[in-house]
Image (cartoon, coloured by chain):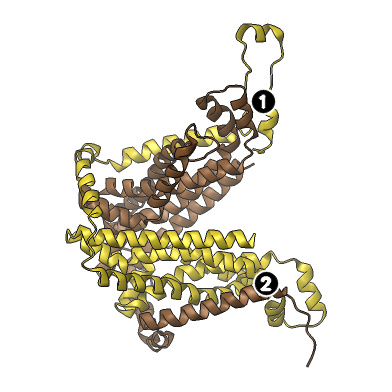
Chain colours: A brown, B yellow
Amino acid sequence: MTKRIPLIARDLKQLYTVFLIVAIVLFAVCSYLTNFNVMTLIANGDAFWEFITEDFLPPALPKSSRIPGILSSVLVTLALAMSATTIAAILAFFVSLFGSEKVSPFPKAAKFVRGFATFLRNIPALVWAFILFSSLGIGTGVGFVALCITSFAFMVRAFVETMEDVSQDCVESLQAVGATFPQRVSQAILPSCLSGFLSWFLYCVEINIRASTIVGMVGGGGVGLTLFSYIKGFQYDIALSIILLIAVMVIVVDQVTGKLRKEILK
Amino acid sequence: MNLNSNETAFEINLKPAVAKRTARIPVKCKQKNRFIPVFLGTVAVLTILSLWYLEIDWGKMASRIPDVGEVFWDLAHLDFANMDLVFSSLVETISIAVLSLLYSLILGIIFGMLAAKNVFRIPVLSVVTQSFFTFLRAVPTPVWVLLMLVCLGMGPEAGVAGLCVHTTAFFTKSFAQSFENIPDETIEALEATGANRLSIFTNAILPAALPQIVAWAGMRLETNFSECAILGMVGAGGIGYVISNSLQGYDYGTAGVAILLVFLVAYCIERIFVRIKKKFS
C-alpha cells in the first residue's frame, strides 16, 4: 500500500467524520419520516420531462392586452420592496441605537430590544402576512407591513452588529467629554457606521425583491399574484415568461445593488 | 469610507478665543464619500414615488389596527388540542428542509466543481453553469415548489425537489467561489505530479474548502427551514399549511401553537450555528 500524506489535521478529520455521521443519520431519519425516495422521483422522470417540454416550453407571451398590466405589477413589486425596506431601515436605525449596550442610554434594556427583534425575525414574512391578512384584509398595504416587520427585525440585528464591530473609542471619548446621546449618535455612530448600514440596506432590498414576489402570491399584489393566477389557470407557458421576467428583475436589481455597494464602501 | 478615519476626524479646536466663548469641543466629522448623500437622496425620492405609486389606503388600515391586537390576543390563547397534527407537520417540515439541504449539498458540490474556473479549466463550461444557476437562483423558491406540485403531485417530493432547485443554485455559486479561493500553488503542485483533474479536486480542492462548505450549509439550513415553513402556504404540506389553514378557519389557538413552534425551531437552529461558527473561527 502506498503511504499517503494526510491533508487534514487529525482533530479536524474527526470533526468532519462527526459531521458526516450526523448528516447520514439525519438523512436516514428524514427519509424514513417523509417516505421520500429519489428513485420514485427518477421513475417519475418521464412525466417530469413531458411536463417541461410540452406544457412549460417554449415560453409564450400573454395576450397583448395583458402586457401593460403585467409590467405595472412588476412595478408594484419593486415599489413594495423599495418603500418597505426604506421605512424599515429608518425605524431599525432608531431602534438599533437602543439595541447595543455600548451605545444605548439604557444599556439594561438593550437585551430586550434584541430579543424582540429576534422574535420578529425568526417568523417568516409570509406568516406575518397571513396573520395580518386575517386582521387587516388582503391588499398591498398588508404586504407592505409584513415586509416591513421582517426587514426591520433583520436590519436591527445587522445594524447592532455593525455598531459593535466598529471601534467604540470615539463613542467613549465623546461620552467622556459629556456629549449627549443625540450628539454621540450623530458625531460618532453615523460617520463611522453609515456605509455599513447602507450596505446592509442594499442587501435587504435584494431580499425584499424576492420576498415581495412571494408575499404577492398569497394576496399582496404585484407580479407574484399575476404568476400565481397563471399557474392556477394551467397556463404554464405564459407562467414561464413571467418567471423569466421575475428572474430578469431580480438579476438586474442584484447587479445594481452590487455596483452601488462598491461605490458606498469605497 | 475608511473606518479609522473618524478617529482622526475629531479636530480639537485649541484656539483660546473660541474656547473661552463657547467652552465646547467641536466634534466635526468630515464626510469623505461624496456618493453617500446622493445615494440617500435618491433612495428618499424613490421611496416617496413608490409609496405614491402603491396607493395604499392608510386610513382603512389604521381603522383596522384594533383588529390586529385582537388577532394577536387570540393567537396568544394557545390551543394544544390539535397538538399531534401540528407536531407531525412540524416534523415533516424539518425533514423536508434537512433532506433538501443534504441532496443539494451533493448536487452543489458536483455543479460547483463544474462552475469553478480552476477545477476543469474549461471557461465555457463554468460560464454556462454559472449563468444557468444565476437564473435558477433569481426565481423565488415557492415558484419552483408550485411548479413541482404540478408535475409531481402533492407530498414531500414536491417540497424537496422545489427547495433543492434554489438551494442547489445557491450552493453552486458559493461552493464555486470557495473552490476558486484555493491557492493556485496547491493545484499546480498536484498537476506537476500528473494527477488527473478529478483526483486534484477530491484530494486538494475539496478538503481545503470543507470548512466553508460546512459554514454555508449551516447558513442555508436556517433559510431552508423558514422557506419550508412558507411552502405550506402556497399549497404544499407541512407546518405552513396548518398555519394558513387554521388562520383561515379562525382557529387562532392552533395557529398560535404552530407559529410559536416555527419560531422556536428557527431560533434553536440559529443558536446552534452561532455556536458552531464560534468554534470554527
**From this viewpoint, which residue is outermost toward the left?**
B249
Q: Nearer the viewer, mark 2 or mark 1?
A: 2
Given the image, on which type of amino acid does mark 1 rest? Phe
Q: Is residue A105 left or right of residue B127?
A: left
Q: Residue at x 38, y 72 (%)?
A: A58
Quadrant hosting residue B35: top right
Position in image of residue B219 (x %, y %)? 52, 62
Label 2 element class:
helix
Q: Residue at x 41, y 82 (%)?
A: A31
Quadrant occupied by the N terminus of chain B: top right
Position in image of residue A135 (x %, y %)? 21, 49
Q: Compared to B149, does B255 lie above or below?
A: above
Q: Residue at x 76, y 73 (%)?
A: B187
Q: Which mark is residue A124?
A: none
Quadrant occupied by the C terminus of chain B: bottom right
Quadrant hosting residue B34: top right
Query: In this orientation, which residue lies closer to the viewer: B143 or A75?
Result: B143
Q: Compared to A202, does B89 lie above or below?
A: below
Position in image of residue B24 (x %, y %)? 61, 15
Given the image, on which type of amino acid does mark 2 rest? Leu
Position in image of residue B156 (x %, y %)? 35, 77
Quadrant hosting residue B50: top left
Q: What residue is shown with label 1?
A: B10
Q: Which mark is residue A12?
A: 2
Chain letter belonging to callout 1: B
Confirm whether residue B237 shows in the render: no
Q: Is residue B29 left or right of residue A68?
A: right
Confirm whether residue B51 shows in the render: yes
